[in-house]
Image: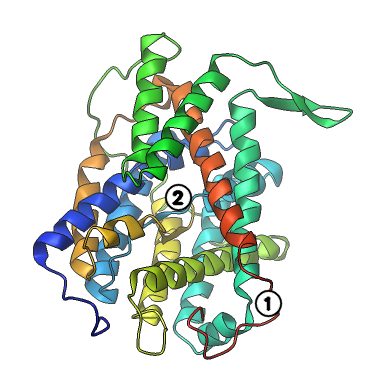
């Protein structure tokens, strides 16, 4: 139930809200597989794209039907970078084994969400500490974005140095300006518009080639059920599994608490509506992501855009899930516009870091979160 002060959502409002949420977060369909299929990971772009759409559509549908919340779910930004760059590339873990680690993190997340341990964690972990995990990942994404845009490059003496400024940096900055301007105007198409406009510019100036085909069949053979769950049980991989678990948990708690509080989707005592069911769906998204062939799934803060448009029930999530279905047929070849996809990652990386950095520094520091506090 909604708070009594809130009007009951209508079907029309839920449809508009669900479509708005989809357009606000639809960038993930291209950005997530671009990160997972970065050079050095060995993951196929086509399989990662299909897995991304599969997790987004199925878990958002589950969020609407089971948790009855207007929150969309998809592979999380930041978690995908940790998966690709830290686990696979830096630690030299095969991507199949990394998918197994995501699976076991989802199993642990499920146990935490279904037991009183979830409440204990929500009470004992300060809000700033939960946000700090997202800030750190945002800084990592910013570094990756600058590197992919050529703004920085490796240096044996100083670790990093200024790179060669070329068309990649110009297009990244143009896309970033577009996203920031539209976001400040509260346009739900801000990130999608920046990606599309940068893509069009790259095609126009022949920095990238358009896809040969407008549609492609889904790829369920390259990453689907390709996880190595047994290999992921090595003791040396346990710290990374725990990192995935707690990063996903903190991200989910921050999203549910922040969005629910801002939208008024709370109980009388200030707790988010259906928090337990929502976290269970979030855990299923992480567990299912390992099976589907992508990084951890999580609830998206972009859902607030659809909620503000009137989508305040689970029907909005069902609409968002249905909107993801046509994305199964997005062209699959990663070679079609490599620069454009990297630039899309760069635009989102920098903006995400700015947004989380601002949120994390604005509240005063706290040592603990009182049990009666609405933020718990």
| 106 up-or-down from 28: above or below | below
Residue 107: x percent and y percent? Answer: 49, 72
Instruction: Say which of 217 and 275 sits in front.
Output: 275
Instruction: Say which of 36 and 78 sits in front.
Output: 78
Q: How many marks?
A: 2
Instruction: Say which of 96 and 133 sits in front.
Output: 133
Residue at the image point whose x is 61% and y is 40% from the top: 142
| 256 up-or-down from 55: above or below | below
Along the polypeptide, which appears first: circle 1 or circle 2?
Answer: 2
- Residue 221 visible? The answer is no
Q: Which mark is residue 294?
A: 2
| 180 up-or-down from 376: above or below | above
The residue indicated by pointer 1 is: 366
* Residue 152, image quadrant: top right
Q: Which mark is residue 298?
A: none
Q: Is residue 94 left or right of residue 279?
A: right
Instruction: Say which of 39 and 185 sits in front.
Output: 185
- Residue 295 visible? The answer is yes
- Circles 1, 2 touching at the beta carbon (< 8 Å): no
Residue 19: x percent and y percent? Answer: 21, 51
């Amino acid at each position: 139930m909604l708070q009594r002060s809130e009007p009951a959502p209508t079907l029309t409002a839920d449809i508009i809200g669900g479509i708005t949420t989809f357009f606000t977060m639809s960038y993930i369909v291209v950005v997530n597989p671009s990160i997972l299929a970065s050079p050095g990971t060995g993951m196929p772009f086509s399989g990662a794209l299909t897995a991304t759409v599969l997790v987004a559509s199925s878990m958002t549908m589950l969020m609407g039907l089971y948790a009855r919340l207007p929150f969309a779910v998809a592979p999380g930004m930041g978690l995908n970078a940790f998966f690709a760059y830290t686990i696979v590339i830096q630690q030299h873990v095969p991507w199949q084994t990394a998918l197994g680690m995501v699976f076991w993190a989802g199993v642990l997340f499920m146990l935490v969400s279904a037991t009183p341990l979830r409440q204990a964690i929500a009470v004992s972990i300060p809000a700033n500490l939960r946000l700090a995990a997202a800030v750190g990942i945002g800084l990592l994404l910013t570094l990756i974005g600058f590197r992919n845009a050529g703004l920085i490059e490796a240096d044996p003496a100083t670790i990093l140095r200024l790179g060669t400024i070329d068309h990649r940096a110009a297009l990244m900055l143009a896309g970033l300006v577009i996203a920031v301007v539209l976001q400040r105007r509260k346009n739900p198409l801000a990130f999608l518009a920046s990606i599309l406009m940068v893509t069009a510019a790259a095609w126009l100036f022949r920095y990238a080639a358009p896809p040969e085909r407008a549609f492609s069949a889904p790829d369920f053979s390259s990453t689907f059920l390709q996880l190595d769950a047994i290999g992921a049980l090595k003791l040396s991989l346990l710290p990374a599994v725990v990192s995935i678990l707690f990063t996903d948990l903190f991200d989910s708690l921050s999203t549910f608490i922040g969005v629910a509080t801002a939208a008024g989707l709370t109980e009388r005592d200030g707790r988010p509506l259906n928090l337990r069911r929502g976290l269970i769906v979030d855990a299923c998204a992480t567990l299912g992501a390992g099976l589907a062939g992508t990084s951890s799934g999580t609830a998206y803060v972009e859902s607030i855009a659809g909620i503000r448009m009137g989508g305040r029930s689970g029907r909005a999530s069902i609409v968002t899930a249905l909107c993801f279905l046509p994305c199964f047929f997005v062209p699959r070849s990663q070679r079609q516009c490599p620069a454009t996809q990297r630039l899309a990652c760069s635009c989102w990386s920098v903006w995400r870091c700015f947004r989380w950095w601002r949120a994390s520094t604005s509240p005063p520091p706290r040592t603990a979160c009182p049990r009666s506090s609405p933020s718990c």
